[in-house]
Amino acid sequence: MPANSAEGIRWNLNDLFSSHDDPRIDQTLNDCRARAEAFSRQFRDRIENLAGLTPEQLLQGLQELESIYEALSRVGCYSGLLYAADTARPEYQDLEQRVEQRSTEIRNLLLFFELEWLKVEDAVAERLIHDPALKLYSHYLKSLRRFRPHTLTEPEEKILNEKDNTGRNAFGRLFSEISSSLTFALERDGKKQDLNLSQILSLLHEPDRNLRQRAMETLYDGLSRHGQVLTFVYDALIQDHLTMDRLRHYPNPMLQRHLFNEIDGAAVDTMMQVVESNYGLGRDYFRLKAKLLGLSRLVLYDQYAPMAQEVTPFPYEQARQAILEALGAFTPAFREIASEFFADNWIDAEIRQGKRGGAFCASPSPQLHPYILCNYTDNLRDVMTVAHELGHGLHGCLSRKQSYLNYDTPLTTAETASVFGEMLVFDYLVARQTDPEVQIALLAGKLEDIFATVFRQNVLTRFEAAAFAARKEKRLTPELLGTLWIEANSKYYGDAVEMPEGYRWGWSYIPHFIHSRFYCYSYVFGQLLVLALYRMYREEGQSFVAKYLALLEAGGSDSPEALLKPLGINIHDPNFWQKGFQEIGRLIKRFEGLVAKI
Ligand SMILES: [Zn+2]
């Protein structure tokens, strides 16, 4: 049983509803349903033509839409949180399902609004987007329209949706079924074990080198047995994507993802080039790590080998104090908001049977404060997890000034406060350790996390692009995919890390390639953006703080590029992205210094 210093730390959901059978839940759903029907009667077929609809009436429609979404989010948040806190209770399962089903019905009633807005002629739409009466919704109205040139007619979209279930969605399900049923036979401590994918991957973090090596060999051997099917699935999905790009007029396979992320593709290209030109930092670190482990060179299965010792247990109360102090040193406003999370029980931290694993922060809407769930096991990773989720919570609180449709951020900027909060707490903790071995372990953990996000996800994206380019010429084979994979990885690992032969199958279990193509660069963007922001903070000091708070307060009221501009940031400028690597360089220097000491 892990230590549980967070026992009794449970969230209080009473400001949402009083219990799972609170009659106000159904009242809210009924009310939302009636309002959605009335909304539909009032506006259906009128948005598309807009004849006789004044900007003021459109404004009133948007406000009503927001207000229905707000009310729905209170119910959805409550049922979701109850269920996450105790997934085994049948009453909570029932409520969660019922709310989900009824919310979907209500949302479907409202869907016409966005679809009709897409059909409005450009000139008319432009006029409304710039109408002073609609100023608050100008970004929302404008950004919905970005998919207009790529949307097909309604009957075409309908057929595609239906056929997708037996087409690309079916291939996705096949992939999920194969990867979740994979078993890997491995002998450990004289006993034969059948491990699943995540179990065998976790062995790559074990201290025993021989075990790591066998785990990696077993992993790739197992994957290669399914190689024919995994290749076929990926090949079919890429071809499907290319076909849809042709029909939807996307000139390149990444463009659709850029539109979702509200990012200009040229900025992504610049960012990825800067990442690539810094791969050497990763290699420097791997050479140091090899030295520290007493090896002449790392083999891939040494990449995540633990170094030095774990830190002593970190009880919840101590974490609370450290986090509040670290955040308070940045700005008292952070400390003040974060204190509320602890004082008013917005956090559920204890370990309980039936509670969902992992951690998340739910920021349902501007009218509600966020809630945090984590499973606190008294180690340092958990401190960083709480700091991360609290960062999301700060973002969620600060942007409550925005209205519902301007509240959420796209994926690329969603981690702006969470990763930043983690950095603040990380630096605070490292500075307070006196044992260099513990500091080494902390820094290594941080650097390896950053590399896995910045460098590896960049490699993944380069591979994906190469596979798409190759598919335009010919059908993909395991040999070809293996070659492209090794090529993309060689640029990163170079001569610093040896790649075993089986690694040719390293591409074959990555779910993003199947379910959300070209998603991986968003991780790079998010992490590097925050490292660069953190660098700016360390360079500019207090003058940075107000600008940063304003960025968080802006929520999703404009595109990332526009929101970052007041901070003097140009995401098309390679020098901006390089700032993130200066920060990584600082961590590596510190690591080197400590290694030299012991
Ligand atoms: Zn996060």
Image (cartoon, rainbow, N blue to C red):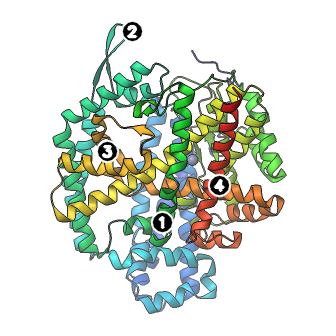
First of labels 4, 3 by sequence position: 3
Residue 461 picture quarter:
bottom left
Disc 4 vs disc 3: which is toward the camera? 4
Residue 304 in the image: state x and y as whole percent: 49, 32
First of labels 2, 3 by sequence position: 2
Q: Is residue 54 above or below residue 21?
A: below
Relative depth, front residue between 598 and 176: 598
Is label 4 in contact with label 1 (beta carbons under 8 Å)? Answer: no
Element marked by disc 3: loop
Locate the C terminus and report the quarter of the image it occupies.
top right
Amino acid type at mark 4: Gln
Q: How far apart are marks 4 and 1 (CA)?
A: 19 Å
Q: Look at mark 1 in the image and give the residue it sits on.
A: 268
Relative depth, front residue between 71 and 152: 152
Q: Find residue 453 and name its label.
A: none
Residue 38 in the image: state x and y as whole percent: 47, 71
Q: Is residue 194 above or below residue 238?
A: above
Crowdedness near tag 4: few (<14), some (14–19) or many (≥20) residues, C-alpha within 10 Å? some
Q: Find residue 507 and name its label.
A: 3
Q: In this view, does 458 lie to the left or right of 64?
A: left
Q: Distance between the residues labelled 4 and 3?
A: 30 Å
Q: Look at mark 4 in the image and give the residue it sits on.
A: 582
Residue visible at 60% across and 35% down? 444
Q: How far apart are marks 1 and 3 (CA)?
A: 22 Å
First of labels 1, 3 by sequence position: 1
Q: In this view, does 95 lie above or below 480?
A: above
Crowdedness near tag 2: few (<14), some (14–19) or many (≥20) residues, C-alpha within 10 Å? few
